[in-house]
Image: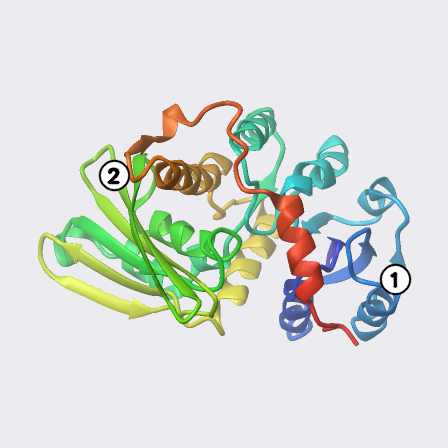
């Protein structure tokens, strides 16, 4: 049985993941460390409902009693600090989306992975069966991809990163630039459009939506046809967790490598910079080293203020 340690239970994923894991006999949450905004009542309820062994007072204590850590903090600016005690003990770490939120952390986590750290992540949409099935079809049958269009809702980064990771799951890496194309705003809802260019000539367009949930829709134009599908969100957690369990059991890694995960973040950073520069195309390699990125602390404050209790 794979022993999982939860680092914070800010978001709903620990609950959803635990529900899926208890349907099988491969893995379980066995301990939790929490310094997030969830109170002791929710932490104790999580422990009780899913039969965890203990609540750890330090990350090092948690690292000593688990096989793999799952970092579930809603504040991506804290993800590296949460991951490092496990990396130091050579324990794999799954980092929930968004894996990081600025170019400095992208480069740091890339260096950690290059040095041998096992960092797993990040978006479950990347591993959706619809995406995996399409990407696995021979080009001789479906044609070569020219353009992918994808949609996501809720917010501009924390949730929208799902659709960018989904696009990357379809076309692979090699993004060169991103440009902000425009915004529509009606009744307090905001939709923004971004355009991505890849080195191999493929392009992608993604829409973010603020103010309401929107489905993950993908339209793929190839040299032979146009394909469309909506991701079944009821199945994406299983797809992700099964891959993590596969790695823990066999050491064969079907999770995207860290540079692929950080490329998704860089696409969105470039898109944000382009928006600030009135739509001027921004190359990923030109993202300034001091770019502030997306503010994880600000997001955490807003998320915590709006959050309802979900573990009791």
Is residue 132 shown to the viewer in this render? no
- Horizontal and vertical percent position of residue 110: 54, 29
Between 212 and 229, the one lying in front of the other is 212
* Residue nearest the observer in this picture, 159 or 130: 159
Q: Image point 39% across, 50% down: which residue?
A: 164
**For residue 81, above or below residue 57:** above
Residue shown at 37%/50% (left/top)? 169
Between the C-alphas of marks 1 and 2, the distance is 48 Å
Residue corresponding to mark 1: 53
> Can you see residue 134?
yes
Residue 273 sits in quarter: top left
The residue under label 2 is: 197
Left or right: residue 282 versus residue 261 is left
**Relative to the observer, which residue lies in front, 199 or 242?**
199
From the image, which quarter does the N terminus lie in?
bottom right
Label 2 secondary element: strand
Q: Residues within 10 Å of mark 1 (few under 14, many from 20)?
A: few
1 vs 2, front mark: 2
């Amino acid at each position: 049985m794979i022993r999982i340690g939860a680092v914070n239970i800010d978001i709903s994923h620990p609950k959803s993941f635990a529900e899926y894991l208890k349907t099988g006999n491969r893995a379980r949450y066995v301990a939790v460390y929490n310094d997030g905004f969830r109170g002791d009542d929710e932490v104790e309820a999580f422990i009780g409902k899913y039969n965890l062994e203990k609540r750890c007072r330090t990350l090092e204590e948690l690292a000593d009693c688990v096989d793999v850590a799952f970092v579930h903090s809603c504040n991506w600016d804290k993800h590296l600090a949460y991951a490092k005690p496990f990396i130091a003990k050579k324990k794999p770490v799954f980092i929930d989306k968004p894996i990081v939120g600025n170019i400095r952390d992208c480069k740091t986590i890339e260096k950690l992975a290059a040095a041998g750290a096992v960092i797993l992540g990040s978006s479950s949409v990347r591993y959706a069966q619809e995406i995996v099935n399409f990407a696995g079809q021979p080009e001789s049958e479906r044609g070569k991809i020219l353009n992918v269009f994808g949609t996501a809702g809720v917010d501009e980064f924390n949730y929208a990163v799902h659709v960018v990771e989904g696009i990357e799951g379809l076309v692979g890496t090699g993004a060169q630039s991103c440009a902000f194309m425009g915004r529509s705003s009606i009744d307090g809802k905001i939709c923004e459009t971004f355009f991505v260019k890849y080195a191999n000539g493929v392009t992608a367009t993604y829409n973010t939506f603020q103010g309401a949930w929107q489905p993950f829709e993908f339209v793929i134009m190839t040299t032979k046809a146009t394909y469309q599908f909506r991701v079944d969100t009821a199945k994406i957690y299983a797809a992700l967790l099964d891959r993590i369990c596969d790695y823990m059991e066999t050491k064969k890694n079907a999770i995207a490598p860290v540079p692929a995960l950080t490329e998704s973040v860089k696409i969105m950073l470039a898109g944000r910079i382009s928006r600030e520069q009135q739509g001027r195309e921004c190359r990923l390699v030109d993202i300034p080293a001091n770019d502030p990125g997306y503010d994880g602390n600000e997001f955490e404050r807003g998320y915590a203020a709006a959050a309802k209790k979900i573990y009791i």
